[in-house]
Amino acid sequence: NQKYFYSKEEDKVIVDFVNNDFKQKQEARRPYDLIWELNMNFYLGNQYSYITPSGFISDIEKIFSWENREVYNHIAPIIETRLSKLNKIKPEITITASSNTDNDTYKAKLANAILTSNFNENNFSGIISTATHWSEITGTSFYKISWNENLNKENSGDATISICSPFEIYPDSNFVENIDDCKSIIETRAYPASYVNEEWNVNLTGEDVDLY
């Protein structure tokens, strides 16, 4: 890999555009982030948490120093019960032959074997469990299918399935129901500067980021 530096003027324009676009998406998504964080606090038993008018998560302080507070966490048992039931559901994708001919039957069996192998290698049951957990707490989760060139090098890589938490996905609109209706989506993830240098050969100075 060759080192690449954003020294050209057109590169700076692109980077500035992406950064500005992300800031706008981040600001528009902020109210939902607060609701998700509040839900997570309630799930963990922090029932005295609330969203402040200035847009932060805080706790209701005790009125008196001698005040004794009890925690009545009804949310965690409900979510855990739902997760237990939902995780027992094991969705499967199967491929059926388009006809009864030996050729189509063989192709269907081969495709099913490849699909099953991919699902097992990606631990799809665990992925579904993680996605369901995010969905129960925040109301949404995302499956990401990508191509990893470092896997199965003899065949130039292999497909991978992963979960993106809703905190990592920033659509251009928070009101559409389907991803296909979005004009642009930004996926964000914070990495150490050392990882960026090792993976992409780009020298950066690390800084604190305000991301969940």
Image: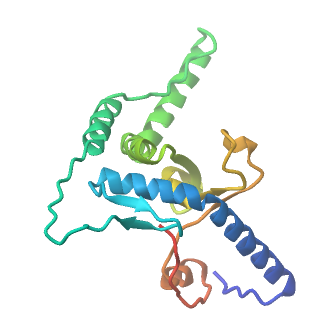
Q: Looking at this view, is 135 or 96 the one in front?
A: 135
Q: Residue at x 83, y 79 (%)?
A: 13
Front residue (pair 154, 21): 21
Q: Residue at x 50, y 59 (%)?
A: 34
Q: On the picture, is 129 further left or further right than 30? A: left
Q: Nearer the viewer, residue 121 or 52?
A: 52
Q: Work out whether residue 157 can be spotted.
A: no
- Where is residue 184? Give x, y as percent: 74, 55
Q: Position of residue 35 (x, y in %)?
A: 48, 54
How far across and how far down the image is residue 107, in percent? 58, 24
The residue furthest top is 100
Foreground residue among 65 and 125: 65
Residue at image point 20% right, 52% down: 71
Total tally of numbered discs in the picture:
0
Is 113 situated above or below 120?
Answer: above
Residue 135 appears in the picture as rendered? yes
**Display coloring:** rainbow
Q: Quadrant of residue 127?
A: top left
* Residue 6 position (above or below residue 42): below
Q: Is residue 73 above or below residue 103?
A: below
Point out the residue furthest to the right here: 10
Q: Quadrant of the N terminus?
A: bottom right
Locate residue 60: give its quadrant: bottom left
Where is 108 relative to 36, above or below?
A: above
Q: Position of residue 26 (x, y in %)?
A: 63, 65
